[in-house]
Image: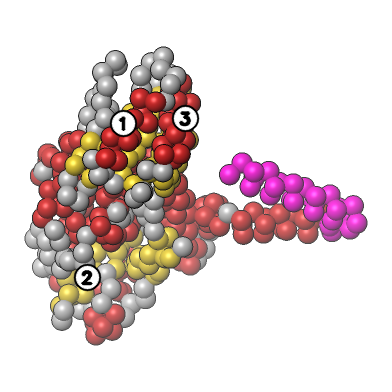
Amino acid sequence: MKAKWIILLIIILLSFVGLVYFFGIGGAIAAFFESVAIFALSNPDMASGYLASFYKQFRSVSFWFERSAVEKRLESTINLASKKVNAEGVNLLPHRIDIKWVEPQSRDAFLKDGKIVVCLESSLNEARNLARATILYTSEDFVRESQRFINPNVLKSAFFAIARKMLMMDRKLDALRCLNEEFLKSEISNNPLIGDYIQTMEKLDSEGVFTRVFLNELSELDAKLPSVLSDPRAEAETVSFLETMKKLPEKKKGIDINPTHRGQVIDMSIMLVAREGVIDPTLYINYAEKCWKEGLPSLYVMAHGNNIGVASQAVIGIKALGIFKVEKEWKFAIPTKRGRFNSYIVILSRLEK
Amino acid sequence: MKREEILAVHKKKLEEFLRKLDLWNALVKGELKCAVCGKTISLDNIGLIIPSGTEIVVCCANAECIFKAKEL
């Protein structure tokens, strides 16, 4: 990511110097427009955000500016946030949002089109629009193909947890407040279980496992199950899986845990590399071998701070045994009260010998 | 990356939009109800406009209603 910005900056600087050198002031003006174009083409979502602010300034001049300001702000914020969420998981939000304004049309034409229309407010009410569009977008797009296999309370809680995460990523605090006040409060008062589930999901997120482990397993349900409308067994397992995952943030120092869910649909284990002072990965390689012998299809390796080195050694050892292969690997930092904390998660999938 | 199209109507165009759909009078008279929770719909709480078979229904901007309305 950083490399992309450095390359972009070098290109812009070189062309700026070149144009000014050869064409003087005219070259400087051309270079300015060229830089803007390069930036916009390489960062369309970020450019959309600036465009939204620009259009908003002219909202009283024409309705077109007002409408475009609303459209660009929503597209920019949601697409940037969904890109960040997707970087933490495996295709959790597979589509970009595209706001299309509908013109007034006859009743028959509307019925024939058969598409739902959402009502959006003025660009001055950005927070409300953002909260509404984010919840609508996540409820449509989030693990789209697997939604029908997830327990309704778990699914609804995941919609809210993802929507809150997306708004927090971009520090859209007004929209977050709006989401809490106008949507979440009534939902929790009707069904307190949703509040508990969201809390658990947010604790998992603070450990880095909400998107990378929990949602990854949910997103794979469609591929694991036949093409049926729903599956009560899978729905029940999504609840028990969340209960299993709950153990992670509750882990006490010095106590070994390896959260394992051995269901018929969700069948996985997390190998937590967390023992202090252990530098030999054999213990962890043996655990992976035991999991393989027991027929486990997925194993997640997780470590924080100083244990990352041992965990990556263990992953190398497991790969060498030919029992699991690496599906995905993340090295990331978790923000904590004491600063950023390095973390490591690997998804391993079973290989047949 | 594929696109998830969300159709939208701006609040400023809502009156014209609802008039075309023959829903405006019902809204003004307070006869337009949320198809999910039954709450009276006004310009302030209208969330979605949904074609449902031969009917057009509306739902309020409540999360529960938005989730359920998509299945109507």
Residue annotated with mark 3 = A313
Asked if A291 appears above or below A38 in the picture, the reply is above
Does the magenta segment cover residue A3?
yes
Q: Residue B50's mark?
A: 2
Pointer 3 indicates a residue of which chain?
A: A
- Image coordinates of residue A342 in percent, x first then y, are 46, 27
Q: Earlier in the sequence, mark 1 or mark 3?
A: 1
- Three-letter code for the amino acid on which mark 3 is drawn: Gln
Disc 1 crowd, CA 10 A, few/some/many (<14, 14-19, 20+): some
Range of residues picked out in magenta: A1-27
A77 falls in the magenta region:
no
Helix, strand or loop under label 1 = helix
Residue at x-position 10% and y-position 55%: A232
Q: Quadrant of the N terminus of chain A?
A: top right
State how far apart marks 1 and 3 are (Cα). Answer: 14 Å
Mark 3 neighbour density, 10 Å: few (under 14) some (14–19) many (20 or more): some
As drawn, which residue projects farthest toward the bottom?
A108
**In the rendered structure, which amino acid carries the disc numbered 1?**
Tyr
Given this view, does label 2 or label 3 mark the residue nearer the observer? 3
